[in-house]
């Protein structure tokens, strides 16, 4: 399930750009309701909107 979040265009945009409407959406809304974002956090140890290192 975390793989879906890795390839999700909304989450990828939020991770890469760190600003804008999509970033705010992922940070504030999707994080609480999306099972893929929750799985991403469990697997990678960081939120779906946090920048890749």
Image (cartoon, rainbow, N blue to C red):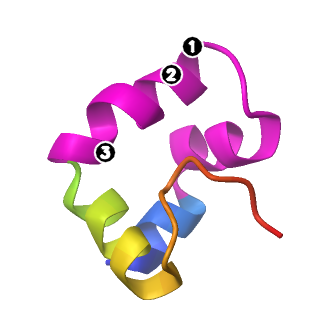
SS of the residue under disc 2: helix
**Which residue is disc 1 drawn over?**
21
Distance (Cα) linking label 2 and label 3: 10 Å
Residue lying at 56% horizontally and 67% vertically, measured from the top left: 6
Callout 2 touching callout 3 (CB < 8 Å): no
Q: Position of residue 33 (x, y in %)?
A: 16, 44
- Relative to 19, is 8 above or below? below
- Location of residue 43 (image quadrant): bottom left
Magenta residues: mostly which secondary structure?
A: helix
Q: Which residues are magenta?
A: 8-33
Callout 2 touching callout 1 (CB < 8 Å): yes
User: Which image quadrant: the C terminus?
Assistant: bottom right
- Location of residue 41 (image quadrant): bottom left
**Which residue is disc 2 drawn over?**
24
Give the farthest residue toward the top: 21
Callout 3 touching callout 1 (CB < 8 Å): no
**Which residue is disc 3 drawn over?**
31
Residue lying at 31% horizontally and 45% vertically, measured from the top left: 31
SS of the residue under disc 3: helix
Q: Position of residue 10 (x, y in %)?
A: 54, 38
Instruction: Mark 1: give few (<14), some (14-19) or many (20+) Cα within 10 Å.
Output: few
Q: Position of residue 30 (x, y in %)?
A: 30, 38
């Amino acid at each position: 399930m975390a793989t879906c979040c890795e390839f999700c265009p909304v989450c990828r945009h939020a991770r890469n750009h760190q600003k804008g409407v999509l970033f705010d959406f992922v940070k504030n809304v999707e994080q609480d309701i999306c099972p893929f974002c929750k799985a991403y956090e469990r697997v990678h140890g960081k939120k779906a909107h946090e920048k890749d290192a």
